[in-house]
């Protein structure tokens, strides 16, 4: 590592040395797909993989931002440094967004142990932005002890956090629905820790019981059984220790069971294949954009002389030949 | 590989914050929404922010622009402090605009001190959006 360190690009070196401005600018470049971030991202990969990446997900309004704030406070009191990514949706109409996850953040302005970055989803489905994975990796490489990723208020199938976080906390509140809701596919399947927030509201015990039933329904011997923790927004200290201990227990389980290594291989394989697919797609698109034949092909499809599938086949073979 | 990545025009990032102690942020929210509808990414920092918190947020969020809203009358103390802190950060300072209840005489002095635009009550949202866009000069 020491040999590699001297070969780091200047910006990467600055990030490792704690330069927050360079970190912030690099995050922007990654979000924008700016080629200036390319070398930095590549060179810092080897330095990531140390921080637990904890996802906080759940429907909108369940108190994710408040929980993130409470977790940040708890981690700081334990002497841990924290990088936070808070994702909010972009407008599908204008591309604009209001990013409000910062509002709940309480910390001393001079505390350099916390770095908080808001991120717009920019059209990505699944509850996170396309760049969220690389940004959380940057925070990891920058040396933060823990990385927290707060997702967009999620729907039932917004489970992309699973591909980024080592531990996913699924946050619910009382009265979200009956116990059959917990059986449905999607969000409830990805929980490593369940958090019933606003536990001071009536119905909290029932919500916990339904989740407990869900946890005991499935799974083989030795599988991870997600703990169910109650937290409160009235008193943000309630349950926060238990919540963090649940995360730590899961992180420990990942190591002792071999799941961490298995999961990493699976996720990285998907990431590499995805990047390669993007690359091939981009190269094909660039060639096609220069290809006058595309327009003639389109004319043929509009006039129903050929069908869209055949047109696509021809495009691909043309793209290959043009290479 | 990323060299070939086609970069769409990246959205303007703007921080909207309320320094000081007044607890009324309807104006700030209306402006935040208008900037959102103009396609910007608005980081809404909310009420009762200290100058230090605002500058810290601007740095971490790497914003192109800062909008301050104030109704308490403490602008002559808080705005120059924010400008000074931004200057301390070095580099090209982030442009700052402001809105709220700010007497004309104060507005003149604040503009001299470096606040790039000041909007009083009754300013149209179109004007605020157009000014915000013009304050962020970047290659399209």
Image (spheres, coloured by chain):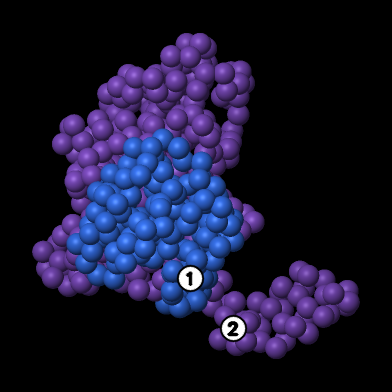
Q: Quadrant of residue A244?
A: top left
Q: Which residue is mark 2?
A: A287
Q: Position of residue B109 (x, y in %)?
A: 32, 62
In the picture as drawn, the residue positioned furthest to the left comes out as A2
Q: Colour of chain A?
A: purple
Q: Residue at x 50, y 45 (%)?
A: B27
**What residue appears at the point 19 percent right and 62 percent down from the top-left corner?**
B88
Query: Is residue A39 in sight in this rendering?
Result: yes
State the separation of the CA atoms marked 2 and 1.
36 Å
Query: In this orientation, which residue lies closer to the viewer: B12 or A221?
Result: B12
Decide if residue A115 is in sight here.
Answer: no
Q: Quadrant of the C terminus of chain A?
A: bottom right
Q: Which residue is mark 1?
A: B134
Q: Colour of chain B?
A: blue
Q: Are marks 2 and 1 on the same chain?
A: no
Up the image or down, A245 lies above or below A35; here it is above
């Amino acid at each position: 590592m020491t040999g590699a360190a001297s070969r780091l690009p200047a910006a990467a070196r600055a990030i490792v040395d704690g330069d927050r401005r360079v970190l912030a600018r690099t995050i922007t470049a990654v979000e924008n797909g700016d080629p200036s971030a390319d070398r930095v991202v590549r060179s810092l990969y080897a330095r990531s993989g140390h921080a637990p990446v904890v996802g906080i997900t759940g429907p909108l309004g369940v108190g994710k931002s408040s929980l993130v704030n409470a977790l940040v406070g708890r981690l700081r009191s334990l002497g841990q440094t924290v990088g936070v990514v808070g994702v909010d949706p972009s407008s599908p109409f204008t591309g604009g967004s209001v990013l409000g996850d910062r509002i709940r953040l309480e910390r001393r302005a001079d505390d350099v142990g916390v770095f908080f970055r808001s991120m717009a989803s920019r059209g990505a489905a699944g509850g996170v932005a396309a760049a969220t994975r690389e940004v959380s990796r940057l925070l990891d490489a920058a040396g933060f002890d823990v990385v927290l990723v707060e997702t967009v208020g999620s729907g039932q199938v917004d489970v992309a956090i699973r591909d980024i976080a080592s531990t996913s906390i699924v946050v619910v509140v009382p009265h979200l629905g009956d116990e059959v809701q917990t059986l449905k596919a999607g969000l409830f399947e990805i929980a490593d820790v369940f958090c019933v927030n606003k536990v001071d509201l009536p119905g909290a015990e029932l919500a916990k019981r339904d989740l407990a039933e869900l946890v005991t329904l499935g799974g083989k011997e030795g599988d991870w059984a997600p703990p169910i923790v109650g937290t409160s927004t009235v008193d943000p200290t309630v349950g926060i220790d238990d919540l963090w201990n649940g995360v730590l227990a899961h992180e420990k389980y990942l190591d002792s069971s071999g799941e961490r290594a298995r999961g990493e291989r699976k996720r990285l394989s998907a990431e590499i294949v995805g990047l390669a697919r993007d690359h091939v797609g981009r190269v094909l698109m660039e060639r096609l954009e220069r290809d006058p034949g595309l327009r003639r092909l389109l004319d043929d499809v509009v006039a129903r002389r050929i069908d869209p599938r055949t047109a696509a086949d021809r495009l691909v073979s043309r793209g290959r030949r043009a290479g | 590989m990323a060299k070939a990545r086609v970069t769409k025009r990246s959205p303007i990032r703007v921080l909207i914050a309320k320094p000081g102690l007044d607890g009324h942020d309807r104006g700030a929210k209306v402006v935040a929404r208008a900037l959102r509808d103009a396609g910007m990414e608005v980081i809404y920092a909310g009420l009762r922010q200290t100058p230090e918190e605002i500058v810290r947020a601007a740095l971490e969020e790497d914003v192109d622009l800062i909008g301050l809203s104030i109704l308490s009358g403490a602008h002559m103390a808080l705005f120059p402090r924010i400008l000074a802190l931004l200057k301390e950060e070095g580099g090209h300072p982030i442009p700052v605009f402001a809105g709220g209840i700010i007497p004309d005489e104060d507005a003149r002095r604040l503009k001299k001190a470096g606040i790039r635009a000041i909007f009083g009550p009754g300013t149209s949202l179109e004007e605020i959006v157009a000014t915000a866009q013009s304050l962020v000069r970047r290659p399209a």
